[in-house]
Image (cartoon, rainbow, N blue to C red):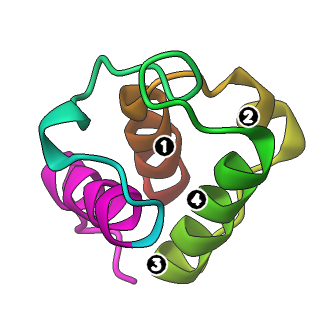
Amino acid sequence: MASTVTKEQIFAEVSKILVEELEIDANDVKLEANLFEDLDLDSIDAVDIAVRMQKFTDKKLSPEEFKKIRTVNDVVEAVYGLLG
């Protein structure tokens, strides 16, 4: 995917994954939502998101970056940083 991807597009993709694949209520998907506390995801769900975002961007998050992710915004920022 080209590096002209916006944060809004990344958020839209993360939202799509959360709603369609992980069956999270769309109203609960906000930038500030904590993946584990607010959305009740587990580590396997988090890995699934990372894998799907890798397919979306053709780039891979490092394990160090991955460990820092707690919120939807963290996912957006980490993916955006990979593309920058």
Kindly state the secondary structure of the residue where label 4 is placed. helix
Residue at 38 percent of width and 59 percent of height = 23
Looking at the image, tell me whether mark 4 or mark 3 is earlier in sequence order.
4
Kindly state the secondary structure of the residue where label 2 is placed. helix
Which numbered mark, 1 or 3, is in the foreground of this view?
3
Residue at 62 percent of width and 28 percent of height = 69
Location of mark 1 (residue): 81
Location of mark 4 (residue): 49
Q: Residue 71's spot in the image, x, y percent?
A: 46, 24
Q: Residue 74's spot in the image, x, y percent?
A: 47, 28
Q: Residue 72's spot in the image, x, y percent?
A: 39, 33
Distance from label 4 to label 1 (Cα)?
16 Å
**Residue type at the position of mark 1:** Gly
Observer-nearest residue: 30 or 6?
30
**Residue type at the position of mark 4:** Ile
Location of mark 3 (residue): 56
The answer to whether 66 is drawn above or below residue 48 in the figure is above
- Secondary structure of the magenta portion, mostly? helix
Q: Which residues are magenta?
A: 1-20
Which numbered mark, 4 or 3, is in the foreground of this view?
4
Distance from label 4 to label 3 (Cα)?
10 Å
Distance from label 2 to label 3 (Cα)?
17 Å
How many residues crowd mark 3 within 10 Å: few (<14), some (14–19), many (20+)?
some
